[in-house]
Image: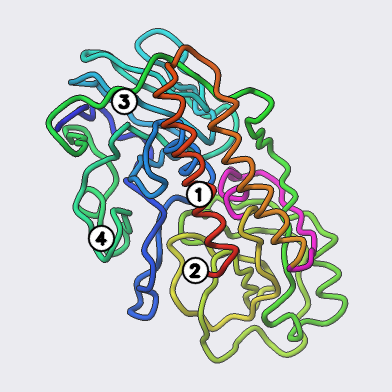
């Protein structure tokens, strides 16, 4: 069922879900939402399954005219959302009527938001995912960002409506700002750096460059000293891996990263903080802080607990049935994070 038509695609709006699993061996990156927390939260607020497809909005969101009633939810960056002439806000879900227009005035906090529609965005599943990988024109809407004239569909022939307006408790909403403290676990090739190089990496402030994108966040700052060159025999590229090139500058590997690479990796960003880094805009500053694997797992458990609280701290006029559905969706999202903890 078509629920909206695209009047303007925005700067870079793509269909994403939690990404492809098991395809890196074939040279296909996982893709998926850059800020998985925002994706999971938007789906929980909308009453969707955790892996339902959403729209990922980058800095300047699209302009959408709804052609049927729908329940929508926004999470992640505050991009100045408006529904017709009224501010829509973020970290909230609401019912929209046919004929209403959702548009975005511009970024106020963060870089990427996820827009969920109850029922999930319906595009073909490619290699187990609906996510868009634009470099190979794979998945999503013909493997490309949204453009004027596109139609957004959800499964089924009946409008999917949950309840009236509701929003997350403001105390539970992340604030991103422009200075980002990012936790990392040293390695896998931290032995290829001098002690001075490692000290520089963990004590310096780096700036997000204009080339930061879904493939990698290129940072600029003090040179990181290498012990024996930047090149290695190519190995797998982990999410959040911090490559250091021959010029001593770090690049953090993101959702559309290459599946293998031949640069040394000084550290790996912990799972929870990859999404926070994805909210950084060019010119923002980044500092890295080393933590243990145990600390990283604790952070992930706290993240799962936060997702579960989404189902219980939402305020609004939703009925008991809709509230129970949101709690189930939030619990399912938390379970998805728990599976990461278990290595599945």
Q: Which residue is mark 2?
A: 344
User: With 271 as the anchor, is 15 left or right in this view?
Assistant: left
Mark 1–mark 2 distance (CA, rounded to whole Å): 16 Å
Split into 4 quadrants, where in the image is the N terminus?
top left
Which of pointers 1 and 2 indicates the residue nearer the eye? Answer: 2
Residue beneath label 4, please? 138
Q: Secondary structure at mark 1?
A: helix
> Mark number for residue 63?
3
* Whether label 4 touches label 1, CB < 8 Å: no
192 lies above or below 243: below
Magenta region, residue range: 274-293
Mark 3 lies on a secondary structure that is strand
Q: How many marks?
A: 4
Where residue 157 sits, quadrant-wise, is: top left
**Sequence-first tag of 3 and 4:** 3
Q: Nearer the viewer, mark 3 or mark 1?
A: 1
Q: Are marks 3 and 4 in contact (CB under 8 Å)?
A: no
State how the image is colored.
Answer: rainbow
Q: Residues within 10 Å of mark 3 (few under 14, many from 20)?
A: many
Rendering coords of residue 246 (x, y %): 64, 78
Density class for disc 4 (Cα within 10 Å; few <14, some 14-19, many ≥20) is: some
Query: Going from the N terminus, do you reach mark 4 or mark 1 first?
Result: 1
Marks 3 and 2, how far apart at CA: 37 Å
Q: Which residue carries the number 1 mark?
A: 36
- The structure residue drawn at horizontal position 38% and vertical position 80%, both measured from the top left corner, is 25
The picture places residue 314, in percent across and down from the top left corner, at: 55, 24
Question: Is residue 290 within the magenta segment?
Answer: yes
* Pointer 3 with pointer 1, Cβ within 8 A: no
């Amino acid at each position: 069922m078509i629920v909206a038509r695209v009047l303007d695609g925005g700067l870079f709006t793509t269909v994403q879900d939690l990404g492809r699993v098991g395809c890196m061996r074939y040279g296909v990156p996982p893709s998926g939402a850059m800020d998985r927390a925002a994706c999971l939260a938007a789906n929980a607020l909308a009453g969707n399954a955790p892996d339902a497809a959403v729209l990922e909005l980058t800095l300047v969101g699209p302009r959408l005219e709804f052609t049927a009633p729908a329940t929508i939810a926004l999470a992640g960056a505050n991009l100045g959302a408006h529904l017709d002439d009224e501010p829509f806000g973020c970290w909230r879900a609401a019912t929209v009527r046919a004929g209403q227009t959702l548009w975005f005035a511009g970024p106020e906090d963060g870089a990427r938001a996820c827009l969920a529609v109850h029922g999930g965005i319906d595009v073909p599943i490619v290699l187990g995912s609906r996510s868009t990988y634009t470099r190979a024109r794979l998945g999503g809407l013909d493997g490309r960002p949204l453009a004027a004239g596109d139609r957004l569909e959800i499964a089924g022939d009946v409008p999917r409506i949950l309840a009236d307006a509701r929003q997350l408790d403001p105390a539970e909403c992340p604030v991103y700002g422009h200075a980002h403290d990012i936790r990392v676990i040293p390695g896998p090739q931290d032995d290829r750096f001098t002690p001075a190089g490692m000290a520089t990496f963990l004590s310096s402030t780096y700036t997000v460059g204009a080339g930061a994108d879904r493939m990698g966040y290129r940072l600029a700052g003090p040179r990181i000293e290498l012990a024996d060159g930047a090149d290695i025999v190519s190995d797998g590229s982990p999410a959040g891996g911090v490559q250091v090139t021959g010029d001593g500058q770090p690049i953090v590997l993101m959702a559309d990263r290459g599946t293998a690479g031949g640069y040394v990796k000084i550290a790996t960003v912990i799972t929870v903080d990859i999404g926070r880094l994805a909210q950084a805009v060019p010119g923002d500053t980044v500092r890295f802080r080393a933590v243990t694997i145990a600390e990283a797992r604790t952070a992930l458990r706290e993240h799962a607990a936060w997702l579960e609280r989404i189902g219980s701290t939402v305020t609004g006029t939703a009925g008991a049935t809709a509230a129970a559905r949101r709690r189930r969706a939030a619990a399912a999202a938390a379970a998805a994070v728990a599976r990461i903890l278990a290595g599945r």
